[in-house]
Image (cartoon, coloured by chain):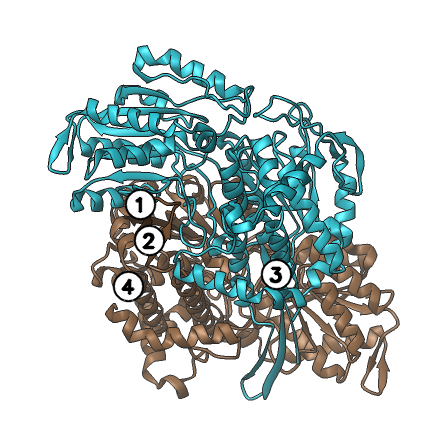
Chain colours: A cyan, B brown
């Protein structure tokens, strides 16, 4: 057994148990509070981040043909000034190929141990990762520490737990003996070997660079495949930090550091296609836009493709116990990370005739007003909850939907800049909310990236559910919510969403409803257009390796 | 727990254990001997087969628009005269869709129980299946009973064991509780549901109609997907027998019999494309030619595709203990089922300088002579071992390679008709063997379907191994063999084949070397062009279903 595997064995075992039972557990605390960490680590992490600014990022990879990178902080509007190696993909792959045999031949426990060590060390750089994520993805500090940090590390460990289970399902050897006719007994000693497929390319997204980064890296690397990380041009630094850690651990353990490499690029000179087209690329993990995700699913036919994209996540409000609590929960989703999360709600379906609230009723307009009021409450401290906009283009999106409001319904709430005392030039936008009816389905069935949402008037709760689940099936959904006091309606809603290939949450209040729990929530069903893969199930890992055998008489 | 699951539980548990440990086990005895079965079953099975000849096959499916089928017995040259429903695929799928919700909503144990019962009843019709396979696929009676009968049933049970393991990995429910900030505890009850993907189309091959038929049906059906069986036009009847059994069991258990349907066709009016193109088709299992398999892999990009095709299986002979035993083992593969098996050997690599045999040596020519002599020995009772040719075109193939012999090397053994006293009009051919050197690689690197093989003179044992493993990697291999007394060479050969993505067997004698053992041999690696799927590993089943969840506060 490898040292690293032994060292982290307890963590792995707990993760496996948590995946099997799906209770609440975490290996990586998600709060950056100095009450947990002490005073020094947050300060030191920030200093390490700042020390990287304006410099060549220290990453020596074979095949470097120049420098690239053009990240700009959405908080300051200033370029980070960090350059990364610009890679000749063929030269890099030639180098990667050298390292493949010894990685392939390493015991699964050795590879798993190394992945566990990588996660552990990444946990040690959560503070610099948080600052890196803030100033690339534009997340708030809290969210950057958790969502693309600690929570994503949990997803990585979860993927590792499944990789371990899948590989453990293959015995290493067997004795086999049987009679063939009168000819005598055949007695064979058999050996089974886990074999990787080839290079795994991990395409990370702009908003949560490591949300799929850790799990896809762990899933491919643990099963024997080298990994090439392809960050979004807007958010390279968090991926670079992971790359550095992975290469360090690999090298320390006597493996070729090129088994984990990074190919950065800019929007003007994209580098994704050569990775997708390289014959050695066997696996593609993609998080990003539905359009490119679908293109990869359809065109990379000789690769294994795992996608997580986006849909038009919905809420159906049939009734609730407490209007303010319900509205608060939904409004939180409209504000959190400026609705740039894959779990952000976009379409809020409310019956025209209003809803039951506790012992009374609330009209449609009262429900809409409660949602508006709740948004305003959440905006009291926007920097913590909303963060900034990752992309200038989102302002154009908001502008467009603002213009569509009158034609399709009415503007419930206009979007405007948010006031961040620490960052006067931050690129921000508060939620834009439109009231429409189902005649406007052409505009609300698109996945709209950013803080644009719709309060959609349906004929009845049943009609709301029908419309929401139809859209989940046809346009995709990663999260769906229902609020109802009526058990029959909840049952019906669960059936309808599930049968539309969507998961559903009922009556969530008092917690961030965007939250997806590693080890417990199967994230993305793969049954609707919002992605074909799940973080994490057995299917996420079982095909990343194959089995070859030898038998001797 | 369903009654059928309980009834067959012990069989399932044994299969799971056998898969986990990979020892020799079978649930379905492969011998048709009346010593095992008694006098009556073989006779009754034959009578049931004969009663089907010349009639409309009794299979009532919605969407029938006429009759089809043009099977001809390779033993008698006579049409079987059986007609099958010709299907309107859209109408059939509309009917299938009706049955999907209740099947989807059934407990995994219910579905597994029904699949176990289907296999059990198929075991009860192994005799009629054997005659049906003989007179369509052209196999010998013994092989028809075992290879596309009992052994294939074992593969079906094996797939079911994996489907059971994969579904059991998903818990049905969980309690989840955690603190969010100071806001209080969130407490969620979660439920997880296994969801099918859609219709599974199973394209069966001509030579072993049910080799992938049982496992693909079990893998898809157990995980909630309806199955449409698409038999090869030359071998419909065995598939029809399975279809009938499956529909009977489903109907008895209160499910829609259309959950298992069959779409038969003829060569002149093929029906495969409408199945592949139907939007409800989500899974394709294919066994057949490498060309069509590759086309499906590349073009059915929105489906899950599992293929098993063929390669140019090789033997490398470096040395052996007993020339006659080694030659006998290899020659058996050249003769068995007239080399129409996916495990049949095609390319026999022998060093030009001859080989070590026990304490002495044998020249290249002596090795070739031993192989020839062994073939003659096996041909003493050809009807049992060789069976007939499934396709007239194989005679043309033999003719073509006979013509190539002089140009590329020499004819070692000519092919000729075999004498079957019971079936004077049987379509047969004994092995055609060519001696060539590696300059002839353009002709021996194709997968040649039928009894054509090459004894290939290599410069050295190492050169033989290099050539054989290169061909495995580039042209595909399902089985590979090495004969050597030299442990170092065996180690080297195992490494070389495994690294080429091929499994390898060493020094097999005294047993049919084509034999692939269910529960023990991972059949097809998926790493070379001979197919992308394995019978059976976790990857064969884990993606056939997805998971949706609901959570309630």
C-alpha separation, residue under disc 1 versus residue under disc 3: 34 Å
Q: Which circle marks residue A112 in the picture?
A: 3
Q: Position of residue A453 (x, y in %)?
A: 36, 25
Tag 1 secondary structure:
helix
Residue at image location 52% in from the left, 57% down from the top: A542
Q: Badge 4 local density, few (<14 within 10 Å), some, or many (20+)?
A: many
Residue located beneath label 1 in the image: A498
Q: Are marks 1 and 4 on the same chain?
A: no
Number of the front mark, 4 or 2: 2
Say yes or no: labels 1 and 3 on the same chain. yes
Labelled pair 1, 2 in contact (Cβ < 8 Å) = yes
Look at the numbered discs 3 and 2 and tell me whether their residues touch, using CB distance below 8 Å: no
Q: Earlier in the sequence, mark 4 or mark 2?
A: 4
Residue B309 found in image quarter: bottom right
Give left or right: position of A43 versus B371: left
Q: Nearer the viewer, residue A204 or B290?
A: A204
Q: Which chain is disc 4 placed on?
A: B
Label annotation for residue B193: 2
Q: Position of residue A402 (x, y in %)?
A: 39, 14
- Point out the residue furthest to the left here: A359
Looking at the image, is A402 positioned above or below residue A457?
A: above
A493 versus B75 height, above or below? above
Rounded to the nearest angstrom, the CA distance separating label 1 from label 4 is 20 Å
Chain to which the residue tagged by mark 3 belongs? A
Percent of width and height locating residue B455: 76, 66
Q: Disc 2 on helix, strand or loop?
A: strand
**Considering the image in quadrants, where does the N terminus of chain B appear?**
bottom left
Secondary structure category for the residue under label 4: helix
Q: Is residue B546 left or right of residue A62?
A: left
Q: Nearer the viewer, residue B116 or B537?
A: B537
Q: Quadrant of residue A499?
A: top left
Mark 3 and mark 2, same subunit? Answer: no
């Amino acid at each position: 057994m490898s040292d690293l595997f032994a060292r982290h064995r307890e963590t792995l075992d707990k993760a496996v148990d948590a995946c099997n039972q799906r209770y609440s557990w975490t290996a990586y605390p998600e709060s950056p509070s100095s009450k947990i960490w002490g005073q020094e680590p947050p300060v030191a992490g920030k200093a390490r981040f700042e020390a990287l600014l304006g410099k060549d990022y220290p990453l020596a990879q074979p095949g470097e043909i120049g420098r690239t990178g053009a990240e700009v902080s959405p908080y300051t509007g200033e370029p980070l000034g960090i350059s990364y190696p610009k890679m000749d993909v063929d030269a890099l792959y030639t180098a990667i190929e050298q390292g493949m045999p010894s990685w392939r031949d390493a015991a699964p426990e050795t590879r798993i141990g190394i992945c566990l060590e990588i996660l552990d060390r990444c946990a040690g750089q959560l503070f610099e990762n948080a600052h890196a994520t803030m100033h690339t993805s534009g997340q708030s500090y809290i969210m950057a520490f958790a969502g693309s940090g600690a929570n994503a590390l949990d997803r990585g460990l979860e993927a590792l737990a499944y990789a371990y289970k899948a590989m453990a399902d293959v015995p290493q050897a067997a004795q086999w003996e049987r009679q063939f006719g009168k000819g005598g007994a055949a007695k064979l000693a058999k050996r089974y070997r886990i074999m990787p497929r080839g290079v795994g390319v991990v395409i990370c997204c702009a908003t949560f660079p490591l949300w799929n980064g850790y799990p896809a890296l762990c899933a491919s690397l643990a099963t024997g495949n080298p990994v090439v990380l392809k960050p979004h041009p807007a958010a390279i630094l968090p991926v670079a930090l992971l790359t550095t850690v992975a290469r360090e651990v690999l090298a320390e353990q006597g493996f070729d550091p090129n088994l984990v490499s990074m190919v950065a690029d800019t929007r003007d000179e994209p580098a994704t296609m050569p990775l997708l087209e390289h014959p050695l690329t066997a696996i593609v993990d993609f998080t990003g836009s539905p359009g490119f995700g679908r293109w990869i699913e359809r065109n990379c036919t000789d690769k294994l493709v795992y996608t997580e994209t986006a849909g038009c996540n919905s809420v159906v409000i049939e009734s609730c116990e407490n209007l303010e609590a319900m509205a608060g929960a939904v409004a939180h989703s409209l504000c959190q990370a400026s609705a740039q999360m894959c779990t952000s709600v976009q379409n809020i379906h409310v019956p025209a005739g209003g809803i039951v609230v506790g012992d009374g009723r609330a009209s449609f307009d009262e429900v809409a007003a409660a949602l508006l009021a709740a948004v305003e409450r959440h905006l009291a401290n926007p920097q913590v909850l909303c963060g900034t906009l990752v992309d200038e283009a989102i302002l154009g999106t908001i502008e467009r939907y603002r213009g569509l409001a009158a034609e399709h319904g009415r503007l419930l709430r206009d979007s405007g800049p948010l006031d961040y005392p620490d960052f006067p030039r931050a690129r921000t936008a508060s939620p834009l909310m439109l009231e429409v009816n189902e005649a406007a389905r052409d505009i609300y069935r698109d996945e709209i990236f950013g803080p644009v949402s719709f309060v959609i008037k349906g004929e009845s709760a049943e009609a709301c559910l029908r419309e929401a689940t139809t859209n989940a099936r046809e346009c995709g959904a990663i999260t769906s919510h229902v609020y109802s006091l009526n058990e029959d309606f909840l049952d019906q809603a669960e059936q309808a969403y599930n049968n539309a290939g969507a998961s559903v949450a009922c009556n969530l209040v008092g917690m961030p409803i965007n939250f997806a729990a590693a080890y417990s929530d199967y994230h993305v069903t793969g049954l609707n257009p919002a992605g074909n893969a799940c973080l994490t199930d057995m299917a996420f890992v079982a095909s990343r390796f194959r089995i070859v055998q030898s038998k001797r008489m």
